[in-house]
Amino acid sequence: MGMKMGIFFVILFIVCFVWFYLRGGSTEIKQLHDSLFALTFFGWSGMNFSSFVIGLIQSFVWGYISVALWGLAGFFSKE
């Protein structure tokens, strides 16, 4: 299940990364988009290739982490 969630998060990351360039708009919106990436991914340095690779890797890892946390929540909520 972690692999599926990781791939799902990677696809979402790619869509969000591409959306930054496809969507026109003011610099404030683009700055907000970049700031949200910086809040989500450790080591984010802007909309560049190295940050793209960092985001891909971390998105995949976040998939495994989310499945693990979901499993722990289910384990501790059993009666």
Image (spheres, rainbow, N blue to C red):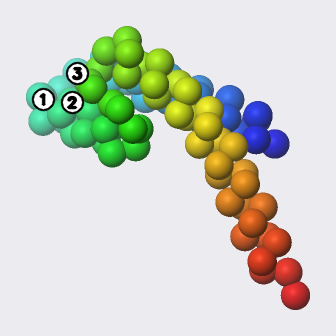
For the residues labelled 1 and 3, the Cα–Cα distance comes to: 7 Å
Q: Which residue is under mark 1?
A: 26
Q: Nearer the viewer, mark 1 or mark 2?
A: 2
Residue 72 figure quarter: bottom right
Q: Secondary structure at mark 2?
A: helix
Residue 71 figure quarter: bottom right
- Find residue 9 and name its label: none
For the residues labelled 1 and 2, the Cα–Cα distance comes to: 7 Å
Q: Could you tell me which residue is drawn at 26 percent across and 24 percent down?
A: 46
Q: Secondary structure at mark 1?
A: loop
Q: Residue furthest right?
A: 79
Q: Amino acid at mark 1?
A: Ser
Could you tell me residue 26's position as x and y percent? Answer: 12, 29
Q: Amino acid at mark 2?
A: Lys
The C terminus appears in which quarter of the rendering?
bottom right
- Find residue 30 and name its label: 2
User: Quick one: label 2, few (<14), some, or many (20+) residues within 10 Å?
Assistant: some
Q: Nearer the viewer, residue 37 or 57?
A: 57
Q: Nearer the viewer, mark 3 or mark 2?
A: 2
Q: Say left or right for 62 vs 30.
A: right
Q: Could you tell me which residue is drawn at 26 percent across and 33 percent down?
A: 34
User: Quick one: label 3, few (<14), some, or many (20+) residues within 10 Å?
Assistant: few
Q: Say left or right for 70 vs 46.
A: right
Residue 12 figure quarter: top right
Q: Nearer the viewer, residue 15 or 23?
A: 15
Q: Are marks 1 and 2 in contact (CB under 8 Å)?
A: yes
Q: Are marks 3 and 2 in contact (CB under 8 Å)?
A: no
Q: Is residue 43 among the parts visible in the rendering?
A: yes
Q: Could you tell me which residue is drawn at 85 percent across and 81 percent down?
A: 78
Q: Which residue is under mark 3?
A: 24
